[in-house]
Image (cartoon, rainbow, N blue to C red):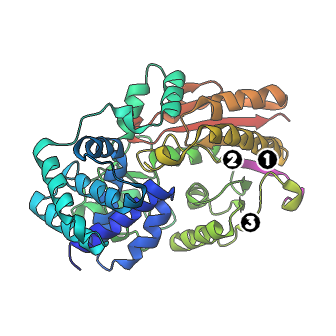
Amino acid sequence: MSGAAPRAIAARVLDAVLNRGRSLKAELAQALPALPDTRDRALVEAICFAALRQHARADAALAAWIPKPLGHRDGDLRALLHAGFAQLDPLGLAPHAALAATVDAARTIGRAHQAKLVNALLRRAQREGLPVLAADAAWPAWLRERVRGDWPDDADAIFAASAQPAPTWLRVNRQRGERDTSLARLREAGIDAAVVDGMPDALRIEGSLPVATLPGFAEGVLSVQDGAAQRVADAISPAPGARVLDACVAPGGKSAHLMERDPSLRLVALDVDPARLAKVREGWARIGVGAAADLRAADACDTASWWDGTPFDAVLLDAPCSATGIVRRQPDVLLHRRAADITALAALQARLLDATWATLRPGGVLVYATCSILRAENDVQVEAFLARTPDAIVEPLDDSCGRPAGAGRQRLPGEGGMDGFFLARLRKAD
């Protein structure tokens, strides 16, 4: 496959995300299987992530360098230019190859008549570099102000960390191998992985790489899961054989971690989307867990539709949220999130807390988690729940889960190399 093909595919993915409100993850999942070479798939992913992280800089360059702004029918051209800029900075690909392949890609996507324009703009970017903007320039104004209001002393660090690529965090499956063995296999393959103090199942690799090629991945020894998400298993720590509810299970990594640690758990796992549940089953089959789990397509808020009345010993509520803690992994969050979403998400989170609390036995534990950094979804949400739930008792979590934040713990993006994440542990009074 020529170098133009992956650039053209990257442009189509970016066009869908930048101009048509589509999810990056969904678009990549659809586009990448068409590429037989793993190197081409890795290139498309790298271009798309890099382009979206700096979309504000690319748009500033286009606004300054093109006398007549691109029209609404030029979305694919704009996307291709973003892809071209990203190859030069920050990916640092060889300029002659990046320019030539991107100009060829212009012809591939039906923009042959604008190939000279693409060439001229990329050459200017090569000479002058893209405009330097503040790290928060990629954030919509309403969200920028909200982050600064919630974290006045940390906001600049949050914006800077969210613009950087995340390391690759791996989780070692205790049912299929030892962490030290996995570490040795990775190093034998020339991959510089490292253990992380206080995280018995975690390995960390700087940068990204095709995970399917990792030694042990195909056999289900390794899974990809950020370090902050791996803390959930420590926070909930169900007793052996406990009956556990995962109220919003997809994509399934946190429950998988629990079952890797203790296959005797009796797990009921819910998700409103049957297609997402199918992906959960597929992922669990790869690592050999969950064969006895009860997976149901159901709305956790509607307990009458799925709960048999038998109380749970532990509940994991990894609630739908703004995903503002994982912008470095999902940069399209900044393009698609709207201010009204936060109000709607907070209302949903409150309903989920109330509904799942009712399914918990006296003495049982509920862990509330989000990958948000907004206080309305986290400590403020939990404080409101405590105010209306007299039998809820806060149980402390230690510093390994982040800094104190009301009744829970908050990790901000980049702290310890991890994603932004909130955790609170609540026990129901006997």
Q: Which dot marks residue 317?
A: 2
Residue 39 covered by magenta stretch: no
Q: CA distance from mark 3 to mark 1?
A: 16 Å
Residue for point 32% across, 30% down = 134
Q: Which residue is label 1 attached to? A: 356
Q: Is residue 247 left or right of residue 23?
A: right
Q: Amino acid at mark 2?
A: Leu
Task: Tell me which numbered mark, 3 or 2, is placed earlier along the sequence.
Answer: 3
Q: Is residue 36 left or right of residue 226?
A: left
Quadrant location of the C terminus?
Answer: top right
Task: Tell me which numbered mark, 3 or 1, is placed earlier along the sequence.
Answer: 3
Graded by Cα atoms within 10 Å as few (under 14), some (14 to 19) or many (20 or more), the crowding at tag 3 reads: some
Q: Is residue 347 visible in this depiction of the protein?
A: yes
Q: Amino acid at mark 1?
A: Thr
Q: CA distance from mark 3 to mark 2?
A: 16 Å
Q: Nearer the viewer, mark 3 or mark 1?
A: 3
